[in-house]
């Protein structure tokens, strides 16, 4: 799509998607009565030039690439250098008019320098007035911003700590399409302002409490705000390589275990009858079978890690302007916020398009990080809590189809290798407009509580089976979506928005994207998180998922919530069959037992796979891995009871608000 806001559309964009202009109207007035130059006479420079450079395809080498500082933008027709050059090349004038010529030249230079020096300050004030927390405001991308009442020095937007020499305001729509920020040489002519003075200056306009004044990603934090040290980082390459070859192991383990249970172990199976009265209460054993069959298909099909090992000779990479790594948090857990920030802020060095941001709710605002705070006065008709903050952030950043957002929870950690794989997904998978990958729960407190570690191992096995089937082969959110490790394109977010009004806004967002024709794909990376550490948090977390999915006014979510509810009947039916087996000692037909054993083995294998692959990612000693597998087999029975208890908790005591668990 052209950068001048033309109406040409990518062939991969669904027809039902709304037409979103890449930039504002070229003739739209700016602050102070200025107008934007048209695309035919505008030289691309400043943030746009830097972002156009960010669209370049990656190098053939897979080693980490450190990008140097971007050189200063070339002089434009309005810059002092260009004005001086134009005057020097003007036709000669008689000596009589030399003094007048010099006076006019000096006046032109002064006006050009003043216009360029004030451009950055105008953008800051426009953003501040646009997001004034004292006013209830709904975003309109075409709103004409009023002229600022006072001018700020250009040093306010200098970002000496950033490898890309961009500011946080350059991330925004006005910064990307307005006048370029002043260069370092121009900034030296203005007196420097300290951070405390800058906060004092911007306090009246509400700027400080909405978003940071400059990028803090590559600036060292004060000693008392550094939080924990740089976290442990997993083995993403090794795990993805192993998973790509494990599909045959899955088949052998599941069908081999089923054969042993059905034909080797003594289970009182009979071959003389096809049905007896005991089969009626044993039917509960087969209720989880639809879920386990879906997982079995996902495990049996190859786990495609990547299709872009060698990119030589392929088509041009898809354009990418910004990749926002967005950590969403309520803000009341200070330690978790700084822990996440420390884990991610170095990622801006990987590529100029990467932006690391933290999104909180007012009154929580964190100094010295790229913290964006959703004001209390912001109103979204339907969205609450996390979805409301995401909607405010979407309107604030004003995405285009060349912007992407990686949504993370406050305890989520993403490593360098995963970011590189995300960039590959964006560049070379143009048919997909959003995607996800597996989430591990081994980042913090892994095996500190055995029960919760084993319980969340099922979620890992679910990602590697059911969701890998969805994202690798179906490319449609048939089974739903996670709220973390959610990679979305700006065009999709603008078409769907986050004003949804659901406890599971991620699932609803995915289904609506499917309705609009946006396909999804699998991101071959790993995001690592933390399991709940208390039983009440575990129950509240599962309860919110269950009730939120059940309340969605859509068919598929209700079907999956129904099968989730059947898990309770399966648990009670299993207990009942054991008791009645002593009272009415009837054998089980072997065909019936075969189906039951296949369901049981597949379900247990999901737990074992989750523990094994997380231990492998963690670098656990192989002997300890072998010890933990039988321990997992025992503890998974307790985990199943906890899952059923959470469902009953949701049925009898549904949540009235969004439960935020402590991590």
Image: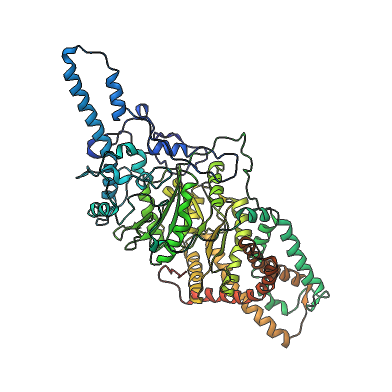
Position of residue 79 measured from the top left corner of the image (x, y, whole percent): 30, 30
Viewer can see residue 331: yes
300 and 216: which is toward the camera: 216
Q: In the image, what residue occupies the spot 49% across and 37% down?
A: 10
Quarter-wise, where is residue 316 in the image? top right
119 and 484: which is toward the camera: 119
Position of residue 169 measured from the top left corner of the image (x, y, whole percent): 34, 46
Q: Residue furthest top?
A: 94
Q: In the image, what residue occupies the spot 43% across and 72% down?
A: 655
Quarter-wise, where is residue 84 in the image? top left
Q: Is residue 613 above or below residue 144?
A: below
Position of residue 611 measured from the top left corner of the image (x, y, whole percent): 63, 66
Q: Is residue 484 above or below residue 165?
A: below
Q: In the image, what residue occupies the spot 38% across and 43% down?
A: 166
Using residue 616 as the reference point, say whether residue 161 is left or right of it. left
Q: Residue furthest right?
A: 272
């Amino acid at each position: 799509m052209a950068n001048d806001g033309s109406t040409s559309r990518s062939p991969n964009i669904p027809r039902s998607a709304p037409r979103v202009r890449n930039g504002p109207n070229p003739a739209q007035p700016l602050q102070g009565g200025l107008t934007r130059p048209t695309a035919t006479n505008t030289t691309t420079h400043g943030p746009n030039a830097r972002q156009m450079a960010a669209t370049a395809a990656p190098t053939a080498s897979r080693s980490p690439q450190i990008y140097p500082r971007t050189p200063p933008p070339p002089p434009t027709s309005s810059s002092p250098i260009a004005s001086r050059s134009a005057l020097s090349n003007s036709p000669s004038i008689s000596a009589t008019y030399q003094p007048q010529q010099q006076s006019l030249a000096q006046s032109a230079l002064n006006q050009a320098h003043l216009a360029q020096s004030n451009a950055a300050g105008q953008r800051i004030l426009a953003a501040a007035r646009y997001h004034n927390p004292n006013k209830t405001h709904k975003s309109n991308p075409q709103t004409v911003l009023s002229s600022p009442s006072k001018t700020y020095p250009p040093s306010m937007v200098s970002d000496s700590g950033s490898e890309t020499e961009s500011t946080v305001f350059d991330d925004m729509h006005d910064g990307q399409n307005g006048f370029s920020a002043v260069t370092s040489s121009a900034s030296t002519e203005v007196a420097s302002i300290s951070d405390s003075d800058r906060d004092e200056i911007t306090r009246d306009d509400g700027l400080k409490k909405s978003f940071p004044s400059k990028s803090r990603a590559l600036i060292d934090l004060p000693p008392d705000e550094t939080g924990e040290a740089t976290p442990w980082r997993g083995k993403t390459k090794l795990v993805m390589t192993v998973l790509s070859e494990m599909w045959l192991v899955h088949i052998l383990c599941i069908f081999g275990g089923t054969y042993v249970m059905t034909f080797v172990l003594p289970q009182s199976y009979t071959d003389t009858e096809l049905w007896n009265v005991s089969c009626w209460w044993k039917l509960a054993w087969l209720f989880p079978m639809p879920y386990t069959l879906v997982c079995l298909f996902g495990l049996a099909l190859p786990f495609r890690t990547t299709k872009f090992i060698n990119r030589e000779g392929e088509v041009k990479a898809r354009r990418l302007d910004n990749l926002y790594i967005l950590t969403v948090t309520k803000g009341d857990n200070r330690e978790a916020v700084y822990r996440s920030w420390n884990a991610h802020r170095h990622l801006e060095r990987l590529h100029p398009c990467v932006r690391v941001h933290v999104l909180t709710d007012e009154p929580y605002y964190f100094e010295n990080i790229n913290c964006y705070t959703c004001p209390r006065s912001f109103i979204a008709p339907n969205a609450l809590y996390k979805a409301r903050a995401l909607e405010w952030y979407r309107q604030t950043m004003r995405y285009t189809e060349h912007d992407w957002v990686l949504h993370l929870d406050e305890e989520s950690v993403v490593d360098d290798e995963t970011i590189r794989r995300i960039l590959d997904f964006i560049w070379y998978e143009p048919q997909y407009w959003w995607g996800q990958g597996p989430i591990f729960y081994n980042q913090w407190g892994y095996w500190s509580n055995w029960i919760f570690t084993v319980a969340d191992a099922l979620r890992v096995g679910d990602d590697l089976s059911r969701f890998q089937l969805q994202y690798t082969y179906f490319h449609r959110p048939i089974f739903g979506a996670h709220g973390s490790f959610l990679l979305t394109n700006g065009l999709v977010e603008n078409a769907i928005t986050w004003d949804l009004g659901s406890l599971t806004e991620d699932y609803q967002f995915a289904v609506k994207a499917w309705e609009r024709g946006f396909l999804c794909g699998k991101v071959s990376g790993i995001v690592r998180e933390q399991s709940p550490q208390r039983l009440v948090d575990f129950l509240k977390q599962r309860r919110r998922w269950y009730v939120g999915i059940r309340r969605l006014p859509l068919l598929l979510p209700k079907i999956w919530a129904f099968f989730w509810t059947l898990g309770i009947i399966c648990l009670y039916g299993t207990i009942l069959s054991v008791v009645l087996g002593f009272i009415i000692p009837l054998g089980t037909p072997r065909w019936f037992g075969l189906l039951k054993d296949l369901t049981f083995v597949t379900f247990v294998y999901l737990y074992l796979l989750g523990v094994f692959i997380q231990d492998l990612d963690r670098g656990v000693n192989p002997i300890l891995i072998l010890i933990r597998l039988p321990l997992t087999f025992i503890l998974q029975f307790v985990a199943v009871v906890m899952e059923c208890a959470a469902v009953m908790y949701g049925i009898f005591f549904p949540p009235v608000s969004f439960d935020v668990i402590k991590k």
